[in-house]
Image: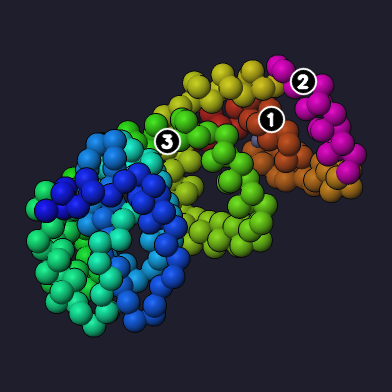
Amino acid sequence: MLLGLVNKINKRTLTNMTDMTEMNEYECIIYMMYSEKTHLRYIGATEQTLKVRLTLHRSMFKRWKEGKGRDYGSFRILEIDPEAVLIELERCSKDLKPFREHYWWDTTSDTTNICEPGVFAAAGGRAAYEKEYSKKYHAENKELINAQQAKYRAENRDSIRAQHAKYRAENKELINAQQAKYRAENRDSIRAQYAKYRAENKELINAQQAKYRAENRDSIRAQHAKYRLDNREILNTKARTKITCECGSKLSKRSVARHRRTKKHLAYLSNNNTQ
Ligand SMILES: [Zn+2]
């Protein structure tokens, strides 16, 4: 029945239909997404204009390609034919839901629709259905979604980077506050993660650090000199502070390591051990 209808609509009409803007607040439109190229069809119902609805289908499709949201069924048309249009099939009162549902029933059997009419109601509303669907879909299609996301990221690296930079610039304070909160709440686990990473990547880290030091010798030296200059008094006080070793020697804190290898200290240790 539908194919017969579509065959009667010429191309000019299809294009005009997508520009339909007048919408009565009591009405809803039963529409068809139709691809001339593939003859695939999707049936939807909306309380928005077809122009707005088509824009939404396209933006939801874009999101879906990034791995977000559920497959609306219309996406398998848009994927093959981005030029697919929306055609008004019927207008009905929002109150005539049984009619809308009935229409949907009769026409979804050979379309790309995924949801059957009444499916939202059965799940406890559209939001509940979408949440449940999204969870299930992600679990069942993990690898596909990851691959799609990786592909999308690779193809849109620059624009993604620009978006992130823009977001960070516009939300600097919020981000800093969030990060500080996260660090405060997860201090121990973060520390443990770092320690684990350092232990597992010791050689890599050493090599990186050696490379960095070699490449930045002069600036590091300058930094150290500046630090010593800026903290002269604290450093001097520290240097003058004497501690008493267990062997009785008085020495500055910084020379403890060296002192522990001296004859005097070693003698004390061996004396103590034999007593
Ligand atoms: Zn000592």
Q: Tell me the kind of residue under disc 3.
A: Tyr
In the picture, measured across the screen, residue 229 lies left or right of residue 167, that is: right
In terms of secondary structure, where does tag 1 sit? Answer: helix
Identify residue for label 3. Answer: 152
Q: CA distance from mark 1 to mark 3?
A: 61 Å
Looking at marks 1 and 2 on the same chain, the residue that comes earlier in the sequence is marked by: 2
Give the amino acid at mark 2: Arg
Q: Is mark 1 within 8 Å of ligand 1?
A: yes
Nearer to us in this view, 157 or 104: 104
Considering the numbered disc 3 on the image, is that residue within a helix, a strand or a loop? helix
Q: Residue at image x 35%, y 50%?
A: 14
- Which residue is identified by label 1? 259
In this rendering, would 263 be left or right of 41?
right
The boundaries of the magenta stretch are 214-230
Q: Identify the residue position indicated by label 2 in the image.
A: 217
Q: Percent from the top left, x then y, of residue 10? A: 31, 46
